[in-house]
Image (cartoon, helix red, strand yellow):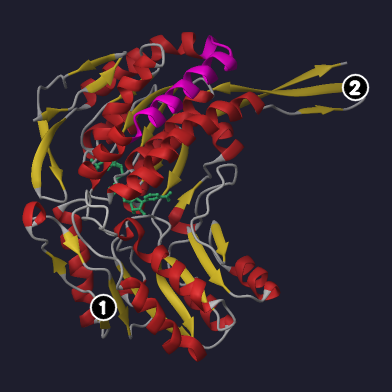
């Protein structure tokens, strides 16, 4: 059985307590590796290593740091197959998706921030008498805590800008999906990253995550995960005046107007609802369809959803894999039951799937589409984060905007219409950090990424991320 180690001070080490947690393969429901059950003592060790490494790393030129990051990107690309297979076994997502999206994007994160740092500049503000210039210094030791849905993709999305700006990092992947972060540590060693610059401490959020959040020498926390966890982190970190970036949950509206390109809208709406088993914070799970095309949309949409075959994620024919854990699988099934109690009609799916062979005990659920629910019922207000989407008819712009904006969340939204004025008008009024018009999940890494309301605080991506991981210092000189 594989045993995962912490990566602290450039070395692979056991948790100080000697304790481990079981790591399950979602597709089989069986334990396949052990992950350190670390605690505050391991975090303390990591902070010491990071503090020691900080003068070395922050003292390097940006060109030197960039070269190391680009080597990591190249190594990830070289080992794509190994990482994609590991991600699929650990997370449950289809192998074709790990190959096409997760691992290439992780490499791209290193490449993007490793080159963006070469173009990062700060401001000057001059008058006749004074010259102000702003330095942007690394913060020091920072904490990066990431979730299980896009494990390496989101882990690297945080650590790459933190490292590029000269910080040393204490990172914690989700204990449900620790494998690719563990494998990444080896590539960082090979790429020549000095010891202690990146420290990966595995374990539970309540122990390791909390210890990172509470540590007085960790001055910034970048967190992606659930809204309640974000709230807990803010409660601890805010009174300590730590910098905080919180990327939290979503319950994203997908709005289909009757003047849309129906073929494209139905196809992409199915993708937006069910990619990665619906376990993407950007998934469009509330699909609002204008009344006049409701039946036509439903027919075509359901025919696309019918093609999302569920099965062994290692088989390339499986469009949808397993849900990440038994607890999450049971949570998603409980929401399907709740939908029936709230008066919904299941149009397709609705049940667990038990494939034959090695995956018989895995955590699979059919892609599920439900109609007949009110926009304000629990199923349409709470984040399910699984393969469940609802169809909701609407009459006009005003009505759909009120329904779309009615949740506590505000991460992403999608609008389908061929009417340009309407598209801009609706996009401007949606309470959302990101709006896609006639497309979904098109990611340009230069753009600000994040949500409003309970979907988060701050923005990642582009120069926003480099600004977050640096402290501006303004210096004013009398001329
Ligand atoms: P969680 O909030 O449960 O966990 C996220 C990370 O935080 C994990 O590493 C977790 O560890 C850790 N954690 C848990 N409790 C604490 C704590 N008290 N202090 C510090 N860290 C802690 O989220 P999930 O892993 O369940 O991920 C799913 C959620 O992430 C969804 O709500 C989804 O919407 C959101 N998400 C948001 C994105 C965005 O960009 N806005 C992108 C992707 C996902 P452990 O695993 O041990 O619990």
Q: Nearer the viewer, residue 217 or 319?
A: 319
- Label 1 lies in ligand 1 vicinity (Cβ under 8 Å): no
Q: Position of residue 296 (x, y in %)?
A: 44, 87
Q: Nearer the viewer, residue 474 or 198?
A: 198
Residue 48 in magenta stretch: no
Asked whether, in this view, residue 143 is left or right of residue 263, the answer is left
Task: Look at the numbered disc 2 and give the secondary structure of its residue.
Answer: loop
Look at the image and tell me whether residue 298 can be seen.
yes
Asked whether, in this view, residue 121 is left or right of residue 277, the answer is right
Q: Position of residue 455 (x, y in %)?
A: 44, 55
Dividing the picture into quadrants, the one containing residue 5 is: top left
User: Is residue 432 placed above or below 351 in the rendered structure?
Assistant: above
Q: Position of residue 462 (x, y in %)?
A: 58, 39
- Label 2 lies in ligand 1 vicinity (Cβ under 8 Å): no
Look at the image and tell me whether residue 375 can be seen.
no
The numbered dot on residue 112 is none
In this picture, which residue range is highlighted in magenta? 58-80
Classified by dominant secondary structure, the portion drawn in magenta counts as: helix
Q: Which residue is located at x 23 percent, y 25 percent?
A: 40
The nearer-to-camera label among 1 and 2 is 1
User: Is residue 120 placed above or below 400 in the rendered structure?
Assistant: above
Separation (CA) of disc 1 from disc 2 = 71 Å
Q: Which residue is mark 2?
A: 129
Q: How packed is label 2: few (under 14 Cα within 10 Å), some, or many (20 or more)?
A: few
Q: Name the residue at the bottom extreme.
A: 292
Q: Nearer the viewer, residue 324 or 238?
A: 324
Residue 63 in magenta stretch: yes
Q: Position of residue 231 (x, y in %)?
A: 36, 48
Q: Which residue is mark 1?
A: 348
């Amino acid at each position: 059985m594989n045993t995962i180690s912490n990566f602290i001070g450039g070395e692979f080490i056991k948790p100080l307590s000697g304790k481990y947690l079981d790591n399950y393969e979602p597709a089989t429901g069986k334990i396949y590796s052990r992950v350190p059950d670390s605690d505050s003592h391991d975090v303390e060790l990591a902070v010491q290593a990071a503090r020691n490494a900080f003068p070395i790393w922050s003292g390097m030129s940006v060109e030197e740091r960039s070269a190391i990051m680009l080597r990591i990107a190249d190594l990830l690309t070289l080992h794509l197959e190994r990482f994609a297979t590991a991600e699929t076994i650990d997370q449950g997502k289809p192998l074709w998706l790990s190959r096409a999206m997760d691992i290439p994007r992780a490499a791209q994160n290193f490449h993007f921030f490793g080159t963006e740092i070469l173009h990062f500049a700060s401001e000057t503000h001059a008058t006749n008498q004074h010259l102000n210039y702003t330095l942007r210094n690394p913060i020091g030791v920072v904490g990066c805590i990431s979730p299980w849905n896009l494990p390496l993709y989101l882990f690297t999305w945080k650590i790459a800008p933190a490292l590029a700006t000269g910080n040393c990092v204490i990172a914690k992947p989700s204990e449900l999906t620790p494998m690719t972060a563990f494998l990444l540590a080896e590539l960082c060693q090979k790429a020549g990253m000095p010891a202690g610059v990146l420290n990966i401490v595995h374990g539970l959020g309540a122990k390791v995550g909390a210890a990172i959040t509470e540590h007085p020498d960790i001055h910034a926390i970048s967190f992606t995960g659930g809204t309640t966890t974000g709230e807990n982190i803010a409660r601890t970190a805010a009174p300590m005046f730590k910098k905080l970036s919180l990327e939290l949950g979503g319950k994203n509206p997908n709005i289909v107007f009757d003047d849309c390109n129906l073929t494209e809208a139905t196809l992409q709406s199915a993708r937006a609802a069910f990619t990665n088993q619906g376990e993407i914070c950007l998934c469009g799970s509330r699909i609002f369809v204008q009344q006049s095309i409701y039946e036509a949309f439903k027919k075509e949409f359901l025919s696309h959803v019918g093609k999302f075959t569920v099965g062994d994620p290692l088989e390339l024919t499986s469009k949808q894999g397993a849900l990440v854990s038994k607890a999450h699988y049971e949570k998603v099934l409980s929401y399907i039951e709740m939908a029936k109690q709230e008066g919904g009609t299941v149009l397709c799916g609705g049940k667990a799937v038990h494939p034959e062979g090695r995956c018989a005990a895995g955590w699979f659920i059919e892609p599920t589409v439900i109609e007949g629910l009110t926009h304000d019922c629990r199923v349409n207000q709470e984040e399910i984060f699984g393969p469940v989407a609802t169809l909701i008819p609407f009459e006009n712009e005003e009505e759909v905007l009120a329904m779309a904006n009615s949740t506590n969340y505000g991460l992403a939204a999608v609008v389908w219409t061929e009417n340009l004025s309407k598209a801009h008008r609706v996009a401007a009024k949606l309470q959302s950090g990101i709006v896609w018009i006639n497309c979904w999940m098109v990611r340009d890494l230069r753009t600000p990424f994040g949500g409003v309301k309970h979907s988060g605080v701050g923005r990642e991506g582009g120069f926003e991320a480099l600004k977050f991981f640096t402290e501006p210092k303004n210096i004013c000189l009398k001329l």
